[in-house]
Amino acid sequence: MSMLEVKCLCKSFGELAVLENVNLTVEEGECIALIGSSGCGKSTFLRSLELLEVPDKGSIAIAGQEITAPQAEVDLIRRQMGMVYQNFFLFSHLNVMDNLCLAPVKLLGMSREEAEAKAKGLLAQVGLLAKAEAYPEVLSGGQQQRIAICRSLMMEPKLLLFDEPTSALDPTMVGEVLAVIRMLARQGLTMLIVTHEMNFAREVADRVLFFAEQGIYEEGTPEEIFEHPQKPKTIAFIQRQKSFRYEVRERTFDLMEMQGGIMTFGEKYGLSSKDDLRLQLCCEETVCAVLEGCYGKDEPVLLDVEVFYREADKEIEVVFEYRGKQYHPLEDEMGVEDEDEVAFSSAAILKNIVSVLSYSYEQGKNQLRMRLKKHI
Ligand code: ADP
Ligand code: MG
């Protein structure tokens, strides 16, 4: 028997069709990652499973029990699912132990002793046994989210649903929450996880669903979706995930911030320090040249830098998009024969490290695409 069986699920909000004929079967022990652009219906899908959004059409069965059936005991079936949200929603007036024991005692008729023993076991697993008597306000966001996960587990759900469980967290606390989810995946819990953490999705999921166009647009193993996506929207989405974007909006932009972002990007993909420096140099020189050549003193600056790394062939590409007059910073210098003349200009520096792939100017927008030369 499948843990989840969704058939022809449809959901609209007024005129807006969010889900159209979504089908999904999840087997026991599977860990599924749901990815996709913001607003594509991932949360609506998860919420529909619990009937927090009432589907317009279709059926949903949890461990063989159809929650959408006319006579369904919705509350009972809902208890088979645990949901963990971005915001942890712990009861602030209850300490950790009471937060964990409340529902199982009240709804499942567990004895308080039994519930406490179970809670202690779970707290130990997530490394928070020492906080059993603490109130939520003294805990960090990461600790609160780990408690929220324990609270869901107290009900022994057959299916755990996570909706961007790390999105509201300070970046330093993302790791501890992902570690707990990873542990649950290893224990064989059946889970659906909406996440923006692509590396995590890739590592933990058995199957990845990419949502677009009112449903599951493409699905596959992490390898298939992240390395060999087949359909255009998946390809574009995955490519964007592997990019670093920086917006320059002032002549006196924060160079250190841009360089820092590039370094973080480089670390993520294991770029050599040499490539990393050349990438920084390329961005700095080009941004400065564009600011000089394209914008007058008080003109508003609209310049976007986006860095892409293609793991397949290790190519690094940078795209500069800037509104304003037509301006190609390398146009003149690239053709100059006499090397000495341009030896110290930014163009000369750039010429050594990049090749220009394309330049275009359309409707007030310059687009300059460069590729980092592979060093010898
Ligand atoms: P995601 O979680 O993928 O970012 P959502 O499922 O939250 O996307 O939203 C999908 C679309 O449905 C969005 O356009 C959103 O504005 C819309 N939407 C979500 N909930 C409601 C609602 N209760 N009423 C009206 N529109 C909604
Ligand atoms: Mg959402």
Image (tube, grey):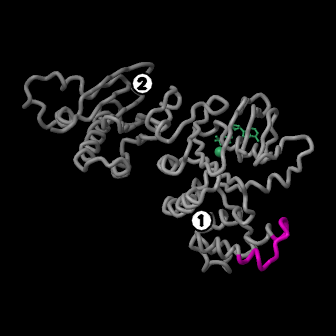
Q: Of the residues tagged 1 and 2, which is closer to the observer? A: 1
Reading the image, the residue beneath label 1 is: 141
Q: Dot 2: what SS?
A: strand
| Total numbered badges shown on the rendered structure | 2
Picture residue at 59% right of the left edge, 65% below the top: 141
Q: Is residue 2 left or right of residue 78?
A: left
- The majority secondary structure of the magenta stretch comes to helix
* Local secondary structure at mark 1: helix
The C terminus lies in quadrant: top left
Q: Position of residue 316 (x, y in %)?
A: 31, 37
Whether residue 40 is visible here, answered yes or no, is yes
Queried whether the magenta region covers residue 125, the answer comes back as no
Return the x and y of residue 164 as percentages of the image width and height.
Answer: 61, 51
Q: Earlier in the sequence, mark 1 or mark 2?
A: 1
Q: Which residues are magenta?
A: 105-117
**Amino acid marked by disc 1:** Gly
Q: Which mark is residue 365?
A: 2
Q: Residue at x 36, y 41 (%)?
A: 251
Amino acid carrying mark 2 in the image:
Lys
Instruction: Report x, y in % for residue 239.
Output: 44, 35
Query: Residue 12: image x %, image y %?
Result: 77, 32
The picture quadrant where one finds residue 20 is top right
